[in-house]
Amino acid sequence: MPIEAGHAFRRRASRFMPGILPLLLACVPEGAPLPNSAAAQDSGYVMQRVAGNAVVLPKGFEIGVFADRLDGPRFMAVGPDGAVYLTETEPGRVRRLMDHDGDGKADETTTVAEGLRHPHGITFRGDTLYIAEEHRVVRFRPPYRDAEVVIEGLPAGGGHFTRTILFRGDEMFVSIGSSCNLCKERDARRAAVIRYRPDGTGETIYATGLRNSVGLAVHPTTGDLWATNNDRDRLGDDLPPDRVNILFEGGFYGWPQCYLPGMPNPEYRNSTASCDSAIGPAVRLPAHTAPLGLTFYTATQFPPEYRGDLFVALHGSWDRSFPIGYAVVRISIVDGRPTGELQDFVSGWQVGRRWWGRPVDVLVAPDGSLLISDDHGGRIFRVWHTAAE
């Protein structure tokens, strides 16, 4: 899609500024019964207990723990063997989780690779496993023992060290966050999404002005590249909005000059021209919710109205007087574009000013359930739909 079409979409994109579903419970002590909340029932949500805590999710769904005792699990991918592979970024490790008996819980956990430098992005192309480290991309061919360097010399250091990787046909995309909160980068590959061939050649800057696009996803029918983006800090509780973008080749998304089209950052007051050319978000999210992983629901285990919708993991805020986020939200998608209101899907990891979990990534499992990684509690949650209400 040419950049002019991207600008047209910017003007008609929906402006979502939802509130996260108000928590319908106070701090429920472990072992205590869940309150019978009429508000939850009336809103179409129910409360359930998982990992000793209460969460809120839509009626007809249940939640359980797929795996626990993990060390900061981040991004996930389904392998050709049906196992779930995940990165543990701080320990520098890749793990493989297998549910042999099909009961919705991993019963085998093995280490695939270790000694890596901040591994984060993970994906498969055929039976080859690709891992994005802070400074390079490596791949493992079966039986996944020896790393082969595909890309080296990625810009490293600075405030954002996670790298995300995704394939769209024969295109390989790597997301590289900024080195700072707000600055002019010396390396044009920072605050950008870069495109390569599968062998690591043909480096091209695909989209820029993206402070930190941690999550990448390809729409299953349009082929559009979607990305979350964590915007700047230190503009107060409610600015700027975090966002989900549709990335167009050659597109500029505003950072550092502006946080929305026509809205310059105070440090760049004279950047009106740059802001006018910036592409706006497909979806606005509340400020400082820190959207990370995202995925389109392509399975059939959920009800038909969920199919094709977008799920986004909100890691939660730090630069805010009262923290928000700590939830997984659902965005209705029609004809490849967002529509309707943003909806909470799972919330409750935050109680008051504290939290017991922080969602990182969302993944459609082979059985059609939704997996949610939590790097704070060291767990992967599984959400599935039950029989008709």
Image (spheres, rainbow, N blue to C red):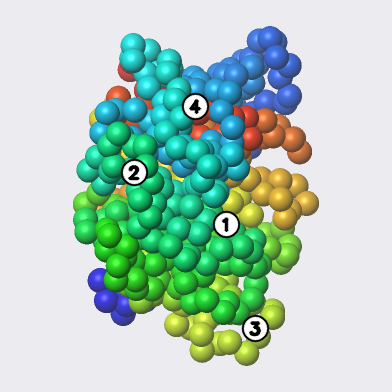
x and y percentages locating residue 299 in the rendered image: 27, 33
Find the distance from the CA under tag 1 to the CA under tag 4.
25 Å
Q: Which residue is mark 1?
A: 161
Q: Amino acid at mark 3?
A: Tyr
Q: Is residue 315 visible?
A: yes
Find the distance from the CA under tag 2 to the CA under tag 3.
44 Å
Question: Within 10 Å of the Cα at label 2, are there few (<14), some (14-19), or many (20+) other Cα atoms?
Answer: some
Q: Earlier in the sequence, mark 2 or mark 4?
A: 2
- Mark 3 vs mark 4, foreground winner is 4
Q: Which residue is mark 2?
A: 140
Residue located 44% across and 49% down the image: 121
Q: Please state the total of marks drawn on the protein image.
A: 4
Residue located 34% across and 71% down the image: 203
Q: Which residue is mark 3?
A: 268
Question: Within 10 Å of the Cα at label 1, are there few (<14), some (14-19), or many (20+) other Cα atoms?
Answer: many
Q: Quadrant of the C terminus?
A: top left
**SS of the residue under disc 3:** helix
Q: Which residue is mark 4?
A: 381
Q: Is residue 341 visible?
A: no
Find the distance from the CA under tag 2 to the CA under tag 4.
27 Å
User: Which sits in the foreground, 370 or 237?
Assistant: 370
User: Which sits in the foreground, 280 or 25?
Assistant: 280
Q: Earlier in the sequence, mark 3 or mark 1?
A: 1
Q: Amino acid at mark 2?
A: Phe
**Residue found at the far front of this picture:** 146
